Amino acid sequence: MEVLRTYPIGFKIRIIYCCKSNCLQSFGTLLMTVSLTLSLANVIRLPRMVFLYGGGTFLVSYLAVAIVFGVPLLFLEITLGQFCQQGTTKLWRAVPLLKGVGFVKVLASVLLAAYYPIIMALSLFYGSRSIIGSIPFPECSNSISFYQGVNSNAIGSDQCLQQTFIKPPHLSWQWIAMDVLLILLIWIIVVISLIKNSKSYRTVALLVVPATFVTIGVLLVKGLNANQRGLDILLDIQWETLWKLDIWYHAIVQFLFTTHLGFGNITTSAGRLYSKSNPFWTSVMLTVVSIVVGLCSVSIVTMWIYDMQLQVGQKMLSSTALSEVWFLTFVYELTTRGILSDLWAALVYALVFLSGFLSLIAAIYTAIVGLSVETKEKWKWWILTCMVCFIAFLMGVLCLLPENLQAVHLLDEYIIGRMVVTSTVLELIAFVWIYGLESLSNDFEFVLGYKLCFVWKCVWLGTPILFMGFEFWSLFVMPLTESDYSSHDSMWLYVIGWIVYLFMWSMIIGIAVWQISAQVDYNFSQKFLSTIKPARNWGPVDPIYRHCWVQWKKQYQVTGERDFTLRRRGTKDYTHSIKRGKHAAPPGTAYSVSPTSLDRTSSCYSIDGVGGLSRQHSSDQQSQQQQQQKNLHQYHYNHTMADQRRWTAAEPKNSGGSSINYM
């Protein structure tokens, strides 16, 4: 205690500030990571799919897909994002032939952001009515007087929705005007949340993610206290129906929606937001938290369904779950029957809004990063944010025009699901089969610092075959009408679904043809072979990190050995290894630098024997240390600039002949 009292006040404040800053940064990174699991796909879509396709039977197939493929595929995308750090479009410099897949992922995120605000606006509409205690809605009863209250002859929740929020514009322009204003309000909040790039994104996550977790926990406790016998619905598993392929296909699509695989969100976030986290444990955490959140949502809904069945006296028809907003109308029905109070209903609608908001900003962030990288940051971030949000706002308004939210049904059932399945399959084919499993393993081992297990390679090799089989089966055996539940859909939904699906393939093929024609080789075969090889500017975006990667590859090609001490510069493991004197390379090599020359975090103060402060290093030692650091950075800079000049001189035609774009 006597020693601690000798510290100056300013020095103690500095230590406390650094500790709090590091803790907050780590906590913010953790919240950024798990924010993707708190999505509308987990809160609304998963319970709907469970209720549509067999209850516990579908849940078993979904859990099997999530457990088997969750960690390997998330691990793949997270590591690719941390290695490249350039978003989901520049990632395809590894295989330029399939660069169009990156744009398909961005398009899927934009389409997702087009109809999610409609569900969020509907939750705001229901939630505000719940707070003021006007459920059932006066507009949905036989009573025409708002002040005299409503009678017991109120119409059903689906019909009430059709007479209010989604009423056609030619019948009542007031409702469509209110819808547009609510959607505009949501997009203004999104612009404010992303206006300062990753900084504002982290701030939003620090506020929204804890509130969402607390809301889910409170609602789960409420459901368990109400009636736990509703969970028996999930235990009624018909094992013979697991042989049906359509259940497994929908389970795969739901898995991709839940984990954001195929949308480019994982890759973009890994490269920009949590680039220093451990990819394996991050993928494990994402999978586990996603499964837990999904099970909580399904459990809450099934317990309320059981309560509804007890009150109605008969089993609820599955046809009532067709709408993508079924969950909202179901909560409205629970409130009108007295199973939920107005305040509990408002809490449910708040959960829908918060989860939709987290999904929306993740999708928009991916689109903005992709656009920023492709334009080489010529436009400012806030301009791109406003532009992307405005375009998505207009698309959302257009989705309100068809009756009964058929546009939302079109995007969710016919378009986005097939887009993410196709993009996931092509991504695995590109990086595992074309880029090469050996090259991919070497890059991953450079990022991770240890050899990959053969299990990862087996899953990555087999997953595209399995997913591709389900995709072809769904195209030729199961039409784009999805299932018997969608047999009542209009013909224009099928036609537009096929048109958009074919447009996706035409975009991929068109960009592939453009990449082939942009090569400078002599004939078509050589041009084609050039597009399935990595571009000259493929690799990490950071120049020094890229230089280390080039040295890693050269050492492996010459000696066949991997120097695992050259790992993940900037992480805690690497910093601690430097402090302990365990540096990257043996003495005399390019990376044999003394630990003291790189230890920037060591204190320049120490406690002397009598309790006072004394300087740890003399002025000569400090000068020597600074000179060593200067020499090291000059060495890396010279070699990096030399490599850059060589890459620029040999830049292929498909890069436009300009200098290397590290963004």
Image: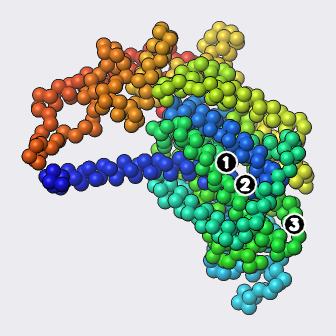
Few, some or many residues within 10 Å of mark 1 (<14, 14–19, 20+): many
Percent x, y of residue 640: 39, 20
Q: Nearer the observer, disc 3 or disc 1?
A: 3
Q: Nearer the viewer, residue 373 or 383?
A: 373
Q: Nearer the viewer, residue 609 or 130?
A: 609
Residue at 15% over, 44% down = 607
Q: Quarter of the image holding residue 226?
A: bottom right
Label placed on residue 315:
3
| C-alpha gap between disc 3 and disc 1 | 28 Å
Residue 95 shows in this picture: no
Amino acid at pointer 3: Lys
- Asked if the residue under mark 2 is in contact with the one under mark 1, i.e. CB atoms within 8 Å, the reply is yes
Q: Which residue is mark 1?
A: 258
Residue at 70% over, 11% down = 525
What kind of element bears circle 1? helix
Amino acid at pointer 2: Arg
Residue 220 shows in this picture: yes
Q: Which residue is mark 2?
A: 45
**Image: 531 above or below 15:** above
**Label located before the other in sequence (3 or 1):** 1
Residue at 47% over, 39% down = 277
| C-alpha gap between disc 1 and disc 2 | 9 Å
Give left or right: position of 399 versus 611. Answer: right
The number of callouts visible is 3
Residue at 81% over, 50% down = 57
Amino acid at pointer 1: Thr
Percent x, y of residue 195: 48, 52
Percent x, y of residue 534: 58, 20
Percent x, y of residue 340: 70, 75
Q: Quarter of the image holding residue 232?
A: bottom right
Few, some or many residues within 10 Å of mark 2 (<14, 14–19, 20+): many
What kind of element bears circle 2? helix
